[in-house]
Image: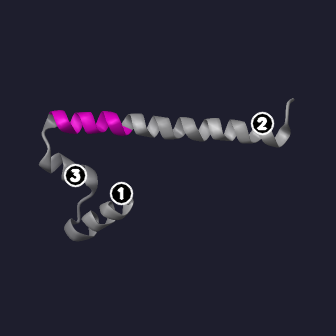
Amino acid sequence: MIQSLCVRLGVATGRDLAQACRDHFSLRVNFGLWVLCEIAIAAYDLGEVLGSAIGLQLLFGRL
């Protein structure tokens, strides 16, 4: 859903989500959004690593 809304924003305004946030929010809010995005990226990557490890463990059994 968020990706489709970002595409609509880009098509309608020619700007991406980060540029639109920078234009409409204060520096403090933008910094908070940046921190939250970095945490979300790290959590997503951690989930991928753990999922890969579990998948390999199930595939190859106990070594």
| Lateral position of residue 3 relative to residue 52, left or right | left
The kind of secondary structure the magenta stretch mainly shows is helix
Q: Marks 3 and 1: in contact by CB < 8 Å?
A: no
Q: Which residues are magenta?
A: 28-37
Type of residue at label 1?
Answer: Ile
Relative image position of residue 41 (x, y in whole percent)? 44, 40
Name the residue rendered at 85%, 31% in the picture.
62
Distance of mark 1 from mark 3, alpha carbons? 16 Å
Quarter of the picture containing the N terminus is bottom left
| Element under disc 1 | helix
Distance of mark 2 from mark 3, alpha carbons? 43 Å
Relative image position of residue 43 (x, y in whole percent)? 48, 36
| Element under disc 3 | helix
Name the residue rendered at 64%, 40% in the picture.
51
Q: Which residue is mark 1?
A: 2
Residue 19, numbered label? 3
Distance of mark 2 from mark 1, alpha carbons? 33 Å
Relative image position of residue 36 (x, y in whole percent)? 33, 36
Q: Quadrant of residue 34?
A: top left
Type of residue at label 3?
Answer: Gln
Which callout, 2 or 1, points at the residue further toward the start of the chain? 1
Nearer the camera: disc 1 or disc 3: 1
Name the residue rendered at 59%, 41% in the picture.
48
Residue 47 belongs to magenta span:
no
| Lateral position of residue 40 relative to residue 53, left or right | left
Q: Count how many numbered circles sit on residues in the image.
A: 3
Q: Is residue 41 above or below residue 2?
A: above
Q: Marks 1 and 2: in contact by CB < 8 Å?
A: no
Name the residue rendered at 14%, 50% in the picture.
23
